Image (spheres, rainbow, N blue to C red):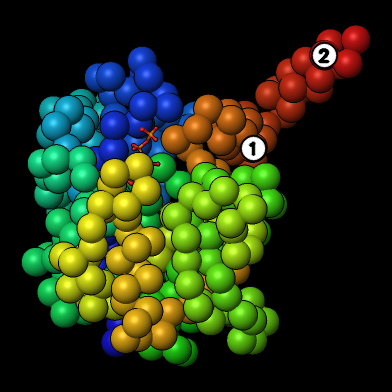
Amino acid sequence: MKITKAVIPAAGFGTRFLPATKAVPKEMLPIIDKPTIQYIAEEAIRAGITDMLIITSRGKDAIVNHFDKAFELEAILERDGKEELLKAVREVSDRLDVHFIRQREQKGLGHAVLCAKSFIGSEPFAVMLGDDVVDSDEPCIGQLMNEFDKCGSTVLGVQKVGAEHVSKYGIVDCERVDGKLYKVNGMVEKPKPEDAPSDIAVLGRYVLTPGIFKCLEKTPRGAGGEIQLTDGIVMLGETEDIYAYDFDGRRYDIGSKQGFLQATVDFALKRGDLKSEFAEYICKTADKIRG
Ligand code: UTP
């Protein structure tokens, strides 16, 4: 079955980025001149997604406004012949139907995904976390969708993170099936390094079957007192096969300061209009740091 819908959970508080996120949703913080959520929308478009549901919460109206039509602004840009800017402003809304729903209480990622139940219905669907940006030639979610086409079951996007980082992620207990595809036998949310079944972490991209909703409805609060998507997937694994795919690409956790800074630098160094001057600045700064 073809996947056309993506769910973007973006209702979290973003406490790691306070005070910036007191009034501005972290998904709206720009990497150079584009809000992070737009990079995610562009990845979805490249993978063939046609409908995107963003899970928002109180104080996140800037996200809704970003994907809305800006009549006045567009009229002015049109009048002034600013074609490039007009294209930039319209880019996503012209190519993707964007829908919104509010998670009224932030009970966790699993609960945020459950809010998409009636929008999704009985189809498999993509989940792309609002604060994970992946830079790759082939869109990360598209890679998982291709694997789903082959195995017809839930596929989690994973990469090795190193033992010292396992306590930040959902970690899978898995065995290799073929190349970069693994069969998942179990999963633990944010384990201590000594309890982690591996150092292979789920990194913000999923293709899920609709069976997940029944599981999430029964999932009790887990790590951090939140309804964890990881726990829902473990329950789903009791009746369906779960796979993990080691995707190609560099993933940035934009919700962390380091991830945000690294994405800003790397993306700037890839931009034709910024690269040479910025690279020179970075080299000079590196020389200063080295003394
Ligand atoms: P995070 O824990 O990384 O996001 O959740 P957060 O809670 O916003 O960030 P910090 O830790 O306070 O800085 C992972 C993803 O799940 C979403 C977040 O928006 C993020 O995309 N989420 C989390 C929800 O949509 N609802 C929730 O109740 C919790």
Q: In the rendered image, which residue does mark 1 sit on?
A: 266
Q: Quadrant of ligand 1?
A: top left
Residue displayed at 45% across by 55% down? 189
Q: Is residue 9 above or below residue 44?
A: above
Residue type, mark 1 in image: Asp
Give the image location of residue 40, x and y in percent. Answer: 39, 50
Residue displayed at 36% across by 27% down? 15
Nearest the eye: 76 or 164: 164
Q: Secondary structure at mark 2?
A: helix
Q: In the rendered image, which residue does mark 2 sit on?
A: 289
Residue type, mark 2 in image: Ile
Give the image location of residue 208, x and y in percent. Answer: 33, 72
Nearest the eye: 140 or 117: 117
* Residue 90 placement: quadrant: top left
Residue displayed at 74% across by 18% down? 281
Q: Nearer the viewer, mark 1 or mark 2?
A: 2
Residue displayed at 46% across by 89% down? 150
Nearest the eye: 14 or 163: 163
Give the image location of residue 193, x and y in percent. Answer: 63, 50
Q: CA distance from mark 1 to mark 2?
A: 19 Å
* Residue 273 placement: quadrant: top right
* Residue 50 placement: quadrant: bottom left
Q: Secondary structure at mark 1?
A: helix
Q: What label does residue 23 carry, if any? A: none
Binning the other alpha carbons within 10 Å of mark 1 as few (below 14), some (14 to 19) or many (20 upward) gives: few
Q: Is residue 269 above or below residue 123?
A: above
Nearest the eye: 197 or 229: 197
Whether residue 162 sits left or right of residue 71 in the image: it is right
